[in-house]
């Protein structure tokens, strides 16, 4: 069990560019979550997958955001036309049937 | 929709003392799960303890225990014999039984002082 892995750990980009984050969950977990966390705040739910199906999306997830989980394994979160307000830590977590979340170390995005 | 409230933005405790962090979880559901997560500075979030709402007994994990008062919607975390390594942000979270969305509170920053 290598835990939840996220890449890249840090990304600095210019406003208007596209960025993509990858999450590799714990292999036997069929549920995968994306959260966004800004400094000093709690994680805010973005979206959730069960296997390859995206079952829930937050209203925070504007049409510039898209997430996929092909084949129910790793997941990607893409942000198009980044804005300075997108600067945050993007957290991925996976979950077994027992329901608790196992988090990765996060991908920190800075939009200049 | 569920809401999670943590009314203590920051707390401090002397090493070896006991501290209690507060949380309220408001939901219309009768069955749900509650969690406390710890996020050390620049480190990933890890689970401290979980509680099923239908269980009468409060959960305990070594130095960590909860006081769950369902009617009052209260879910507090007690840390006994505080250690320097307990310094972290602590987040309370909840998930309704039939939902899959975990909702987090704003967190409490705990500092353990030597």
Image (cartoon, coloured by chain):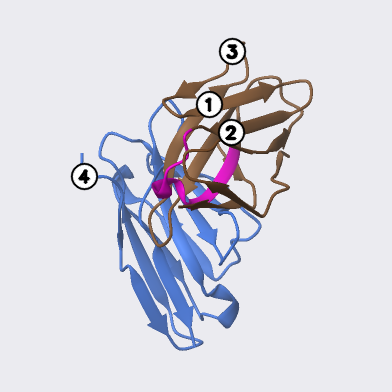
Chain colours: A blue, B brown
Q: How many marks?
A: 4
**Residue B77 numbered tag:** 2
Q: Chain of mark 2?
A: B
> Within 10 Å of the Cα at label 4, are there few (<14), some (14-19), or many (20+) other Cα atoms?
few
Q: Residue furthest left?
A: A1
Q: Which residue is mark 3?
A: B55
Q: Which residues are magenta?
A: B81-93
Does the magenta segment cover residue B108? Answer: no
Q: Which residue is mark 4?
A: A2
**Element type at mark 1:** strand
The quadrant of the image that shows the N terminus of chain A is top left
The alpha-carbon separation of the residues under discs 1 and 4 comes to 28 Å
**Element type at mark 2:** strand
Q: Chain of mark 1?
A: B
Does the magenta segment cover residue B82? Answer: yes
Q: Position of residue B21 (x, y in %)?
A: 63, 40
Residue at position x 41%, y 53% from top?
A92
The alpha-carbon separation of the residues under discs 1 and 3 comes to 14 Å
**Sequence order check: which comes first, mark 2 or mark 3?**
3
């Amino acid at each position: 069990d290598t835990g939840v892995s996220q890449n890249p750990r840090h990304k600095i980009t210019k406003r208007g560019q596209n960025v993509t984050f990858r999450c590799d969950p714990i292999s036997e977990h069929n549920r995968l979550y994306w959260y966004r966390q800004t400094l000093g705040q709690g994680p805010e739910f973005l979206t959730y997958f069960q296997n390859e199906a995206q079952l829930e999306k937050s209203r925070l997830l504007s049409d510039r955001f898209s997430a996929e989980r092909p084949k129910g394994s790793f997941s990607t979160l893409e942000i198009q036309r980044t804005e300075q307000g997108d600067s945050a830590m993007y957290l991925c977590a996976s979950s077994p049937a027992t329901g608790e979340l196992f988090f990765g170390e996060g991908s920190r995005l800075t939009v200049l | 929709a569920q809401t999670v409230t943590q009314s203590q933005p920051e707390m401090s405790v002397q090493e070896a003392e006991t501290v209690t962090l507060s949380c309220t979880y408001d939901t219309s559901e009768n069955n749900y799960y509650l969690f406390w997560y710890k996020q050390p500075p620049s480190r990933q979030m890890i689970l401290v303890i979980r509680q099923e709402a239908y269980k009468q007994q409060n959960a305990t994990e070594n130095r960590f225990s909860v006081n769950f008062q369902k009617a009052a919607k209260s879910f507090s975390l007690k840390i006994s014999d505080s250690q320097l390594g307990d310094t972290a942000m602590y987040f309370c979270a909840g998930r309704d039984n039939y939902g899959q969305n975990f909702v987090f509170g704003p967190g409490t920053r705990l500092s353990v002082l030597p």
